[in-house]
Image: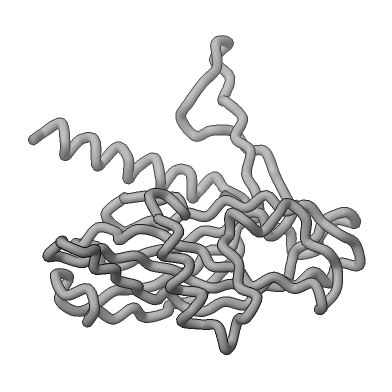
Amino acid sequence: MKSLVYGTLSLWLLMVCVSWAAPEPAIVPGPRDWTLVVTFEHPQLLSLQPRGVSTPTHFWYIIITLTNKTNRDVDFYPNCELMTDTFQIIPAGRAVPPIVFERIKNRHKSKYPFLQPLEKAGNRILQGQDNAKDLAIIWPDFDMRAKGIKIFITGLSNETVTVDHPVAKDATGEPIKVYLRKTLELDYSISGDPALRQSINIDYNGKRWIMR
């Protein structure tokens, strides 16, 4: 039990140290820096009831629209994670069967007729409104004890920075270098009975750009 408590405290302290050390994105971007225009839908729940299974399987998703107004085509290598306030980190797309996206696409076909799953978006975003992409980002259900989640979406900008790790050292005793990318953070709080996933409320607390 003590080891669990100490492990949790160590993880919390490390996260605090990293957040203190991480710089903010540049107020004035460099001449070669770019950031896509992003709009998004808030998290929604999709439940599947497999035949012969008494309890449904839950998934969460958001839909983002990316528009490239940078006057040049740009590379797109996204990384998306959902983090709970209980320190659970879930990469997007993990253990998500294809039928989940098909259900999402059908649910939103009137508003997003060209919706794509994130993993099939390709590695290039062409410039112009006509080339905007509507993408579904999907996660399996998260920790039922969570009272808050943060969603991190990286790959929307090419702005990067390298900082010293607050704890880890290399063989010479120097801090290990950590490579950070400009990342969109979406913050939500959760209320309601955690056992009744269909009835919980997810409230939007805001967004910000961070280096992560």
Left or right: residue 89 compared with residue 9:
right
Q: Nearer the viewer, residue 196 or 53?
A: 53
Q: Nearer the viewer, residue 115 or 196?
A: 115
Residue 138 vertical position relative to residue 18 in the rendered view, above or below: below
Residue 24 visible in the current orientation: no
Residue in view at x 73 percent, y 51 percent: 123
Location of residue 7 by image quarter: top left
Residue in view at x 62 percent, y 77 percent: 39
Residue 13: image location, x then y, percent = 35, 42
Which residue is outermost to the front?
51
Location of residue 61 by image quarter: bottom left
Residue in view at x 80 percent, y 60 percent: 34
Q: Quadrant of the N terminus?
A: top left
Q: Nearer the viewer, residue 46 or 79?
A: 46
Residue 142 vertical position relative to residue 41 in the rendered view, above or below: above
Q: How many marks?
A: 0
Residue 74 visible in the current orientation: yes
Residue 35: image location, x then y, percent = 75, 63
Residue in view at x 63 percent, y 38 percent: 179
Q: Nearer the viewer, residue 61 or 154?
A: 61
Residue 129: image location, x then y, percent = 81, 78
Residue 75: image location, x then y, percent = 78, 52
